[in-house]
Image (spheres, rainbow, N blue to C red):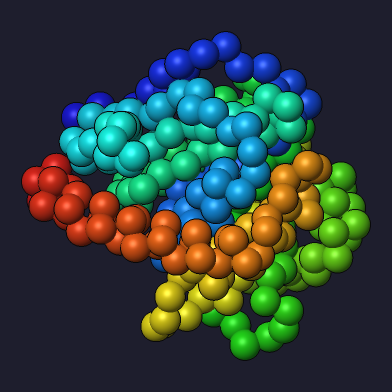
Amino acid sequence: MNNEIVIRELKSINIEGGYVIDGFPYAGLANAIATESLINTTSQFELAGVLDSELFPPISIIRDEIPGFPARIFVNEQLKVAVFSSYLTPHESLHREVAKTILKWANDHKCSLIVSSSAVKTEEKPFVIGVATTPETKKRLADADIPVLKNGTVPGIPGILLNEGSITKTNVIVLLYKGQETGPDFRAGAEICMAMAKLVPGAACDLRTLMSEAENVEQQMKQAEEEAGPLRDAIYG
């Protein structure tokens, strides 16, 4: 079965010099919640494309009476920001392909920075730290008062983004937050959203609105994951 991921753009997109945010869920839902909340609390984001693959579960996500693909691209041309948003966690076999698809799309659209996030198990403060691929992105972290991770491991889609970005000199930042065994992901999602807003000029997160919205988004995503479970099992066995 072909594991190629196809992007179908629904409108012309001009975000040259702008930003791409990876919102695929990985190791919990915090990353997806953060990006979904960013879309909902920053105005003028429009659906601009969808992602599809033979290895994605065949499912339609209905929101506000409108059916849609589970993996989508939202664009704010005024801020020059594109968000890859997904209600479903891609299978581990697709992580490399997802990361390379994001990198290629960002390069094709001449974007200046890719931002992703992942959980780490640590009791150290602060709650959010970062990893960067270039001197320019390290400076961005410093300017945003986000400490840099010195040693550690970043798995999955964010890890591939860092590896590929490092060897191709592509500007990539991965925000790392404290993972937890139990409890809701929406609080971590809110922290990540606030950190992303520091890195992307013009992006904003109203904390009070974000917390209530993020909790709702988490519930919707968990429901989508539950309903997609049998379909995913049929594909991967």
Residue drawn where x is 38% and y is 37% of the image: 71
- Please give left or right for residue 237 compared with residue 39 in the image: left
Residue drawn where x is 63% and y is 58% of the image: 193
Looking at the rendered image, the quarter that the N terminus falls into is: top left
Hey, which quadrant is residue 192 in on the image? bottom right
Residue sitting farthest toward the top: 12
- What percent of the width, then of the height, locates residue 86? 41, 44
In the displayed structure, would residue 31 be above or below residue 215? Answer: above
In the displayed structure, would residue 140 be above or below residue 222? Answer: above
In the displayed structure, would residue 111 be above or below residue 138? Answer: above
- Please give left or right for residue 91 compared with residue 32 in the image: left
- What percent of the width, then of the height, locates residue 11? 51, 13
Hey, which quadrant is residue 109 in on the image? top right
Residue drawn where x is 62% and y is 67% of the image: 208
- What percent of the width, then of the height, locates residue 158? 55, 52
Viewer-closest of 120 and 223: 223
In the displayed structure, would residue 98 be above or below residue 130? Answer: above
Q: Is residue 42 visible?
A: yes
Residue drawn where x is 23% and y is 36% of the image: 60
- Please give left or right for residue 16 compared with residue 95 in the image: right
- What percent of the width, then of the height, locates residue 41? 61, 49
Viewer-closest of 152 and 71: 71
Viewer-closest of 163 and 110: 110
Label tally: 0
Q: Is residue 120 visible?
A: no
Viewer-closest of 173 and 40: 40
